[in-house]
Image (cartoon, rainbow, N blue to C red):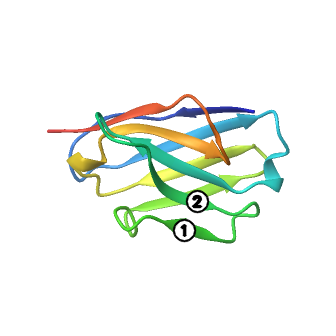
Amino acid sequence: VQLQASGGGLVQPGGSLKLSCAASGFIFNKYGLSWARQAPGKALQWISSISSDGSVTRYAESVRGRFTISRDNAKQTLFLQMNSLKSEDTAVYYCTKESSRGQGTQVTVSS
């Protein structure tokens, strides 16, 4: 299983970013996938999940209404659209499949 997140960066509060996760090594359209994040000094936090066909999504309360998870099964790619970013969203973001976690991407929200 390989999961490579990208798209992070430095953004001002209120700004937007779209993360991508390129996946390989498994049958992509058979698995639900998730995004999680880890802020400095804190535990890994689940933030969103999507079903294998994209029809069902779930969000942590802290991001509901601001973040949108989606997937392109043809391209084996998972996405996370992040709007109205806050300083507390600063973290390394990971895409996950069950217990597997790939290389993350840093998101920093700061003025």
The quadrant the C terminus occupies is top left
- 46 and 58: which is toward the camera: 46
Along the polypeptide, which appears first: circle 2 or circle 1? 2
Q: Is residue 48 above or below residue 16?
A: below
**Looking at the image, residue 28 lies above or below residue 8:** below
Label 1: how many Cα within 10 Å (few below 14, some 14–19, many 20+):
some
Q: How many marks?
A: 2
Image coordinates of residue 61 in percent, x first then y, are: 38, 68
The quarter of the displayed image where residue 9 is located: top left
Q: Which mark is residue 49?
A: 2
| Image position, residue 75 (x, y; %) | 75, 43
What kind of residue is marked 2? Ser
| Residue for point 49% across, 61% down | 68
Q: Which mark is residue 110?
A: none
**Residue in view at x 21 percent, y 42 percent:** 12
Check disc 1 and report its element: helix, strand or loop: strand
Q: Give x and y (percent) for residue 55.
A: 69, 71
Label 1: which residue? 58
Residue 54, image quadrant: bottom right
C-alpha separation, residue under disc 2 versus residue under disc 1:
5 Å
Q: Position of residue 24 (x, y in %)?
A: 77, 34
Quadrant where the image shows the N terminus: top right
**Relative to residue 20, is residue 84 depicted above or below?**
below
- In which quadrant of the rendered view does residue 57 lie? bottom right
